[in-house]
Image: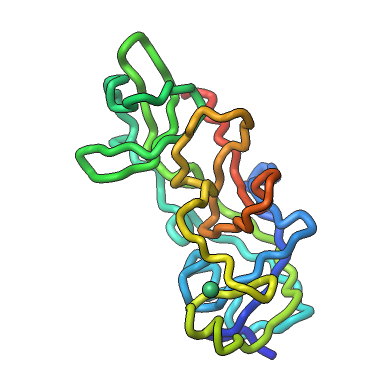
Amino acid sequence: MKIQSKRVVSISYVLKDDAGNVLDESAGEELVYMHGTGRLLDSLEQKLEGHEAGEKLSVRLTPEEAYGVRDADKVRTVKRALFEDLEPEVGAAYSLETDQGMQTAVVVKIEGDDVTIDMNHPLAGMNLNFEIAIDEVREPTAEELKHGHAHPHGHCEDDDDDDGCCCHHHHDGDDDDHDHCCCGHHHHDGDDDDHDHCCHHHHHDGE
Ligand code: ZN
């Protein structure tokens, strides 16, 4: 069965940058999504379209096809007060209310009251190299079709914005250091441990 709009697709994947560093991977737990719903990057969905279960694909996305080029204007210095009750931490990502609306920003430097943030997407400016194995392609169930998303374990897991995955993460200063992520998907089945499909650790080591 070919991948096409509304079909439910299971993939395993590894995402690397040009240097071969792994940015994200399915690591034994496949990603299940409904095709054509914007769950993945549009460009990635386009490359998957028409392929079938059992195929393996290498997909390379340019920054333009993925998260855009880096924009120097998105690096700026703000006052610590913008973080309200959060304690900014270099390398961590925050959702901040800015003059451009809610933005996800990674803190790159802190000097007294001045906090330098980078609002570029963590994967901006990068080529994304995916190795993808298509594990399954099936028709959606009536319920999935109605909801507009896949039910990977046979039931709806859409408790929405509890999330935490990725770049819309409000760093709440809690224990662990799962460093937010993101590749356009959420995988939160409410279970405890680490954010399986989260990707990209923000090692912004200062530039
Ligand atoms: Zn649902």
Of residues 124 and 10, which is closer to you in this image? 10
Whether residue 30 is visible to the viewer of this picture, yes or no, is yes
Q: How is the image coloured?
A: rainbow
Percent x, y for residue 147? 48, 78
Of residues 73 and 174, which is closer to you in this image? 174
Kindly indicate the quadrant of the structure image that contains residue 107: top left
As drawn, 6 above or below 102: below
As drawn, 18 above or below 114: below
Kindly indicate the quadrant of the structure image that contains residue 64: bottom left
For the point 44% across and 38% down, which residue is it?
170
| Count of labels in the image | 0
As drawn, 38 above or below 115: below
Whether residue 125 is visible to the viewer of this picture, yes or no, is no
Furthest-top residue in this view: 112
For the point 32% across and 26% down, which residue is it?
84
Percent x, y for residue 132? 70, 66
Of residues 105 and 60, which is closer to you in this image? 105
For the point 69% across and 71% down, which residue is it?
153
For the point 31% across and 12% down, which residue is it?
113
